[in-house]
Structures are given as structure tokens and as C-alpha cells.
Image (tube, rainbow, N blue to C red):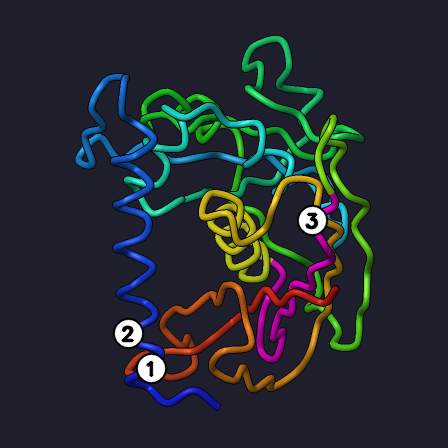
């Protein structure tokens, strides 16, 4: 199990990596103002864990460099709202809609740009907690002429984790793994849910570390991306 000082170092490294990504992605374009607070809004009609991971991956891969810069400057912050994307399509057309139509993505953009959507909808709250023991394959994203990139597993510790918290941690994990190259384009991905996981140092391509909701004085590793093939 990773000690608190190791978790703290990795959390600091994440902030540095995101700042570097923001600076690199904005090169050749308009400078990113971190104070602008650009974030993403996702409108979710129905939750399926595998579909959700797929939607996060596809959204992150489709972003242009300036959008990556703006989002990384605000630490890939995302707000999840409960709603039916089809009902918003005319008045509030989304920037991206996931395959199947269950998730609509807006941004990255300043909060004012999505204020109308936010006034219409409430934050997403899942009806149940996720069970441990899920092993769900996510088909690779088609990438023309791409060489094989191996297989990866996203392991999520779902102990005491509500569905909306799962969404937050998984979205951060998938987006940041995509932007840093830890999760290559076209990679096969499997979602695995576990309880009370211990993520050992050196065994992961990426780890999602945040404040432990059950003990705010401590950090917790909520997810890890490992290469499995």
C-alpha cells in the first residue's frame, strides 16, 4: 500500500503534469488564462459503467489542442448533470454526444457558457453504488493506420464510492491518461472494479489520487491504469 508521503508526491506530480500539458497544448495559439476556469459539463441520461468509460475516452481523444490546454489549466474539472441530451439538442446543442446518445458533452468552456444548461438540470446522482468484481471490456477506439498499442486495465476502488463519485474519478483518470499518453490511442481497455484495493508503487501507468472523503486529512488512491498486455 502506498504511504501518504508517496501519495502526496504523486498528487503534486499530477498538478505539474497538467500545468505542463496546458503550456504545451497552447503553444502556437492563444495563451490559456487559468483564472478563466474553463470546465466541461456532461449531461447524463443513463449510467452504464462500460459506456461511461468509453464516452470519457472518446471525448478526450476528440479534443483539439487549445481545448486540452484550457481544460488542463483547470485540472480537467467536470460537472455531471442528470438530463436527456435529446431534449437539449435544439436550444443547447452539445459539442459532442457519446455513441448511443446517453451523454452530451459541453466545453471545455467558461462556466457562463453552460449556465443555461445548469439552470435546467440537477447534478447527477446515481441510484446505487457500483459492485466490486466487475470486469468489463471496452472495445478499442478505431485509429486509422495505428500500430497495436497493447491492452490496459483501469482498476477502480469502489468501496464506499457513490456512482457520481465513480464518474468524477474515472473521468479524471481517462482524460489525464489520454493527454499524458499513458493511455495510447487505439488501446484495448478493460474496466475492473475492486474493493479496498492496494495500489503498489511502480505497477501503474497512472494513478488517480485525491482527498479521502471518509478521512479528509488523508489522501486515497481511487483508480489505477495498468498495462495488461
The one nearer the camera, 148 or 204, is 148
Query: 110 or 224, which is in the foreground?
Result: 224
Magenta stretch bounds: 148-163
Report whether 139 appears left or right of 207: right
Give the image location of residue 84, x and y in percent.
69, 30
Query: In the image, which is nearer the foreground, mark 1 or mark 3?
Result: 3
10 Å neighbourhood of mark 3: few (<14), some, or many (≥20)?
some
Q: Badge 1: how crowded within 10 Å, few (<14), some, or many (20+)?
A: few
Asked whether, in this view, residue 53 is left or right of residue 207, the answer is right
Element marked by disc 1: helix
In percent of width and height, residue 123 lies at 51, 45
Q: Which residue is tagged 3?
A: 149
Report the disc number at residue 9: 2
Q: Is residue 155 magenta?
A: yes
Mark 1, residue position: 6
Q: Quadrant of residue 5?
A: bottom left
Q: Looking at the image, which residue is at 45% across and 43% down? A: 78
N-terminal of the pair, mark 1 or mark 3, is 1
Q: Residues within 10 Å of mark 2 (few under 14, many from 20)?
A: few
Picture residue at 32% right of the left edge, 67% below the top? 11
Kindly report the distance in space between the C-alpha atoms of the residues bearing marks 2 and 3.
Answer: 28 Å
- Relative height, residue 27 to residue 220 (above, below): above
The picture places residue 15, in percent across and down from the top left corner, at 28, 56
Which element type, helix, strand or loop, lies under badge 2? helix
Q: Quadrant of residue 118?
A: top left
Amino acid at each position: 500500500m502506498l504511504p501518504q508521503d508517496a501519495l502526496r508526491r504523486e498528487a503534486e506530480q499530477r498538478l505539474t503534469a497538467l500545468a505542463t500539458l496546458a503550456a504545451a497544448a497552447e503553444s502556437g495559439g492563444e495563451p490559456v488564462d487559468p483564472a478563466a476556469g474553463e470546465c466541461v459539463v456532461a449531461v447524463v441520461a443513463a449510467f452504464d459503467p462500460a459506456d461511461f468509460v468509453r464516452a470519457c475516452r472518446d471525448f478526450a481523444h476528440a479534443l483539439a489542442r487549445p481545448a486540452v490546454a484550457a481544460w488542463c489549466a483547470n485540472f480537467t474539472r467536470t460537472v455531471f448533470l442528470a438530463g436527456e441530451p435529446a431534449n437539449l439538442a435544439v436550444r443547447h446543442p452539445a459539442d459532442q454526444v457519446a455513441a448511443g446518445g446517453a451523454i452530451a458533452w459541453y466545453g471545455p468552456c467558461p462556466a457562463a457558457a453552460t449556465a443555461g444548461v445548469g439552470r435546467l438540470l440537477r447534478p447527477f446522482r446515481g441510484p446505487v453504488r457500483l459492485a466490486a468484481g466487475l470486469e468489463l471490456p471496452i472495445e478499442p477506439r478505431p485509429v486509422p493506420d495505428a500500430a497495436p498499442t497493447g491492452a490496459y486495465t483501469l482498476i477502480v476502488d469502489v468501496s464506499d464510492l457513490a456512482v457520481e463519485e465513480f464518474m468524477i474519478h474515472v473521468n479524471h483518470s481517462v482524460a489525464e491518461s489520454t493527454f499524458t499518453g499513458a493511455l495510447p490511442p487505439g488501446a484495448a481497455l478493460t474496466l475492473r472494479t475492486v474493493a479496498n484495493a492496494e495500489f503498489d508503487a511502480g505497477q501503474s501507468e497512472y494513478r488517480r489520487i485525491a482527498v479521502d472523503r471518509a478521512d479528509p486529512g488523508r489522501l486515497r488512491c481511487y483508480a489505477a491504469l495498468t498495462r495488461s498486455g
